[in-house]
Every structure is written in C-alpha cells, then in structure tokens.
Amino acid sequence: MVLTEPIVITGVGLITALGQDRESVWDAVRRGDCGVRKLTGVPGIPDGLMLAATVDLPEPNRKILKVTQLCEIAAAEAMADAIVDVEQVDRDRFGCWIGAHMGDDRGALEVQGIPFEDLNMEANWFDQWLPNTTCAHLAHKFGLQGPGLSHSTACASGLIEMLSATRALRDGQCDIALVGSGESVTRLLAAGFYRMRVLAYDDDPTQACRPFDQNRHGFVLGEGAAMFIVERLSHALRRGAKIYAEVRSCRCLSEAHHITGLDENAATLVRLIHDTLQDARLTQEDIGYVSAHGTATEQNDMVEMRGIHRAIGHQNKSYCVSATKAMHGHLLNAAGCVELALTTLAMRDGFAPATLNLTHPDAECRFDGVPLVGKTNQFKHSLKLSLAFGGHLVSVALSRWNDAESGFAYPATSAIKAA
C-alpha cells in the first residue's frame, strides 16, 4: 500500500549552542550570532586545543548521555509544538526515527587502567556500545510503539531518518512519527577529527569557519539536537494541527567514490538534485533557497558549489544558498536535522539565513551565498543537502504550507511570493 496524500511537518524542537529552544536558536540565526568558542571541559582533550559550539545544559542529567539529553529536550519541544497528546493518538502507529550516535568510552578506559575525570556520570552499560540508545530512550519516554529505527550514515544520518520515516508514513506502517538526531562533543569524536586535520582554528573563534570562502580551512564541531513531528495530512487535520511545511521528496544516493573524499565532477550530486526535483514534481526554477551542507573544507565546498550550480543555476537566476555551520558548528550526525529545522523556520518567516565569514567567495560560488547578513526572501520551495563521509548524499525538498482551508497557513496565501 502506497498512500499519495502529503506528508507534513507539524512540530519542531531545536537546541544548539545558539539557544536552548527553537525560537531562541532561530532568533540568533536571524541576527547572525556565532556560538563558536574554545573547547573546554572534555576529559582527555586539553582545554583550548580546538574550537567548538557546545551547549551548556542548565541541569545536566548524569544518568544519560549528553546527546540523549539534548535529544530529549528537543523531542519534548517538538511534541509540545505539535500539540501531541500521546493519550489521544494511537501509539501503536506512532513511529520513532532517531539518528545513531557515539557511546560512552569510559568502560574501555577503566578496564585498561587509564584514569578519566568524568566519574560523576552514572553511565548505563548499554550507553557504551549501543548507537541506538537515544532512539530507544525516546520511544520509551513517550510510549511510541510504532516502527523504531536508528541509522548510522555519518553527517547524512539526520536526513536519512527523515527519508526513512516519510517512506514508512507513505506505505502505511504508521500515521505519525518523531524524527530527528543529536550530537555531543565526546573525546573520541574530538580526537578523531583533530587527527584528520579538518578542524578550523582562529584566535577569534567566530572567524574560524568560512563556508564557500577562498580562505576556508575547515569546520568546527557543534552540539545540539533537532526533532520533528511528521505525519500524513489527514492525521494532522484530524488533530487540528498547524502545519509548517510539506515534505515533498527525500532522496539519497551513494557516490561510491571514497570513504572521505568526493568526486570532483559532482555528477552524483547533480543527479541527486535532479531526482529529488522530479520526485517532488518541482522544476529548477521553483527552488528559492538551498540549505547547503557547507562544511568549509576545501573539497566538500568545491563539489557542493559546483553541483548546486550545475543542477539549478543554469535555469534559475534568483535562488540563494546559505551554509549555517559557521554559526552553530558542524553537528555531524545531527547536522542534517538541525539545518532542516532552520530551513523550515526560514520558510515560515520568509528569511534566508546568512553564510557568516563569506568575505571572499570562491570562484565556484556562482550563486547568491547570502554573505555575512541574512535577508528577507519569501521562498515557497527549498532544498536541504547533506554530503557525508562514506559517500552518503541526501536531499530533502520542502514546500511551504499555504493552504488556509486545511490546517495552518504560514502566512496567508496572498502574502507569498514564490521565488
């Protein structure tokens, strides 16, 4: 059974270094704030060795992983935003798709006799090796007994969860789903990327990450989580839910090129974008905004800039592209969902976020990269891209919800100007 009715987003939860909830994060993004600072307080990593956009939790829960607590906060906000009463919906048909994450390495250090400082955390044994811990935790917390899945596809994980959830909604496995991912900066994570030499550093942390800029030299790590309530339109309307956007298409391809490198001709990315637009029944000219992966690394930026221009730019002269990692850091497993949440809010308010530190655009940046300052842009259709290690390429097409007669409209249809 394949259902053809629209799949819609009815709730959004968000926490990053820029804020502890959805609207505070979005307000900071609109202002062009930067949450990057010197990394401190990670056992085993010398303070100040690298930069990161970390989250200071007012009440840390030492009984669960930090990434799990970040996801729990965002999930509770998304559920409240969507006005979901779990006692009034069929929890047997309520799915849960939460991205995989790294675990707790303290047990491995303990058996080797290696000292570690964070003894005050009461870790569960399963936190050490189950990357689906958070998915199981949230399903249990909210009593969600529909399909529950957790994928590990590097920086594409968040969008892969959205892809998997929308497919399950379309084929009738569930009616509504909690979808998202989170990330925290752990010692293994930080040490691994430091050894890769892909992390940017600057005496002024706010200037370190420079997506699409000639002088880019890497990314900074980030923490946070983003969660969505996603459901079939009929289910949302029965509940009287407001609607942010329609998820028009989710597509993925494997580049099959290199574990960390990308094919410089960008052919797979171009095909992915074309496939997404065709599946969404959109044209290149329909796209008003692209939320890029934009890691500010030499090769990733080059391939992404080239692919976006080849797939869209020859037919569309008015779209804009921004990369927001310079503000909130690279959230790795959670990057796709955090940036998809920002895209959803950008559509809601008709505002394209800035690409910070884009002072000298690369020659491949042949589009409006929204340099330095965000701008008003009433776009109706958008794309979110993720280009991940392992060759996982994912694209999500969203359309702003403008049907005032069936649900909530952001804003009235008459105020919309298609890009």
Image (cartoon, grey):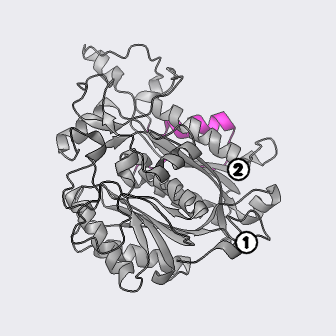
Identity, as a three-letter code, of the amino acid under mark 1: Asp
The reply to whether residue 381 is in sight is yes
**Residue 403 falls in image quadrant:** bottom right
Residue 12, numbered label: none
Queried whether the magenta region covers residue 141, the answer comes back as yes
Point out the image quarter for the N terminus. Answer: bottom right
Q: Kindly give the residue lying farthest to the bottom in the view shown.
A: 315
Q: Nearer the viewer, mark 1 or mark 2?
A: 1
Q: Earlier in the sequence, mark 1 or mark 2?
A: 2
Query: Helix, strand or loop at disc 2?
Result: loop
Density class for disc 2 (Cα within 10 Å; few <14, some 14-19, many ≥20) is many
**Residue 169 falls in image quadrant:** bottom right
Q: Are marks 1 and 2 in contact (CB under 8 Å)?
A: no
Query: Helix, strand or loop at disc 1?
Result: loop
Residue 403, numbered label: 1
- Marks 1 and 2, how far apart at CA: 18 Å
- Residue occupying image coordinates x 33% and y 77%: 309
Give above or below for 265 relative to 220.
below
- Residue occupying image coordinates x 64% and y 39%: 76
Of 290 and 130, the residue lying toward us: 290
Density class for disc 1 (Cα within 10 Å; few <14, some 14-19, many ≥20) is some
**Residue 299 falls in image quadrant:** bottom left
Identity, as a three-letter code, of the amino acid under mark 2: Ala
- Residue occupying image coordinates x 42% and y 46%: 33
Queried whether the magenta region covers residue 218, the answer comes back as no
Give above or below for 55 relative to 411.
above
Q: Position of residue 390 (x, y in %)?
A: 30, 56
Of 140 and 308, the residue lying toward us: 308
Report which residue position mark 2 lands on: 82
- Magenta range is 131-152
Q: Position of residue 228 (x, y in %)?
A: 60, 51
Q: Position of residue 316 (x, y in %)?
A: 42, 83
